Amino acid sequence: MATESAPPELPDPETLADTFRVYEVDMSADDGVRYYGEPVAESEQVLHSVAPTFRQRGYRVALREETGEYVLVAQERSLGVEGVPWTNVAFAVLTLVSTLYAGTRWYGLSPTEDPSALLAAWPFAAAALGILAVHEFGHYIMSRHHEVEASLPYFLPFPNLLGTLGAVIRMNDTIPDRKALFDIGVAGPLAGLAATVVVTAVGVTLPPVELSGSLVTHVELGYPLLLQSVAAAMGEPLTYANPLLSPNPVVIGGWVGAFVTFLNLLPVGQLDGAHVARSLFGDRLSAIQIAVPLALFGLAGYLVAFEDGRGAGMWAFWGLLALVFGRMGSARPVDETGLGPGRWAVGLLTFVLGMLCFVPVPVVITM
């Protein structure tokens, strides 16, 4: 049913007239209440103008163009989890299986010969997935704190040496201000780093694994300064003179945490680093997003010139991804009020800690 007025709990069309002139309201659509009209400002300015009004009424809003018409779609915000999130559960189970399978390689076991070997790889799976979970729930908890609608984490299974591509959450809401964007963006890396330090400290105290003929004997990991510092503080080695000795796979879980943290802190697109940088530097993020792929391509070129190309392909690939992510846009808060010195200090410290997770050649596979 179409009408010119809105439900009492939603903004009246006349209150939106400064940026969006409404000529019809449809309350019968399945995807929310739809305000059809004409924007009198740029799309971004329209959203920045009307979003706070809808947010105060418990709704989130999006501006769309459909068959030549502009429409504001208002949907009720829901901060809780309704029912069992079966999709999240299914992806978590699949990722658990894939990381258990990957873990058997780091233990030198063969699940094809002995399926029970999967269970023996649980410390690696617990370490890797635990860090990812802590990282994503850092985002989720801070989203709830700022009343920003976000999904539970989606774990991503993948048949590689780690068994996963990480985990993500989806934010289906407008970000009220820079403080909220900063807190949500920084919470994941800091929580994940804390978990990484704990996992690595535990891992280096566990006995190394002796491998023979395993695929991972051809895998050489580069350990960043963060993990080296943790091992030194514990008085334990990260590498061994015997080439058949590998650090306990729990340490590999710590390596996963450090590597994922560094990549997430690249300030491009929708990555955590872009959220933090956007909160700190505002629109100057655009220039930063141009510099990031150039730096990654430069690193790849350096490795080709001076390190026999070791690791160059991976950084060239991430340079391409950075270009794509940068063109996809970044989150923009409604209120652009700058941050105070406390958050600036935390933000800069986060990027410093991220650099401690960097290593020029993270992994090399030799056959």
Image (spheres, grey):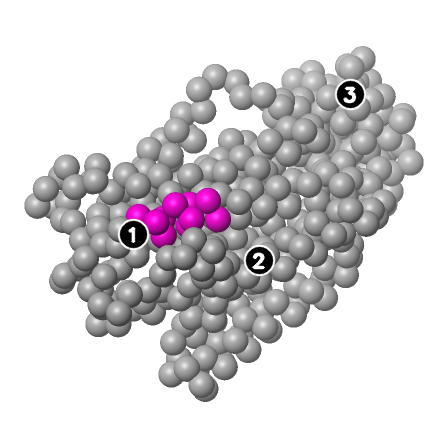
Inter-mark Cα distance, 2 to 3: 39 Å
Residue 52, given in percent of the width and then of the height, sits at 81, 31
In the rendered image, which quarter is residue 174 located in?
top right
Q: Is residue 30 left or right of residue 337?
A: left
- Towards the viewer: 173 or 23: 173
Q: Is residue 293 left or right of residue 93?
A: right
Say which amino acid is labelled 1. Asn
Q: Marks 3 and 2: in contact by CB < 8 Å?
A: no
Between marks 1 and 2 in the image, the one whose residue lies nearer the viewer: 1
Between marks 3 and 1 in the image, the one whose residue lies nearer the viewer: 1
Say which amino acid is labelled 2. Gly
- Which residue has dot 1 on it? 248
- Identified at 44% across, 20% down, the residue is 84
Q: Is residue 23 above or below residue 305?
A: above
- Among the two numbered marks 3 and 1 on one chain, the one whose residue lies closer to the N terminus: 3
Identify the magenta region: 197-206
Inter-mark Cα distance, 3 to 1: 53 Å
* Quadrant where the C terminus is found in the figure: bottom left
- Identified at 55% across, 61% down, the residue is 356
The local secondary structure at tag 1 comes to: loop
The local secondary structure at tag 3 comes to: loop
Q: Residues within 10 Å of mark 2 (few under 14, many from 20)?
A: many
Task: Tell me, yes or no, whether the highlighted magenta stretch contains residue 40.
Answer: no
Where residue 354 is drawn, which disc sits there? 2
Inter-mark Cα distance, 1 to 2: 24 Å
- Which residue has dot 3 on it? 57
Q: Does residue 259 appear in the picture of this structure?
A: no
SS majority, magenta: helix
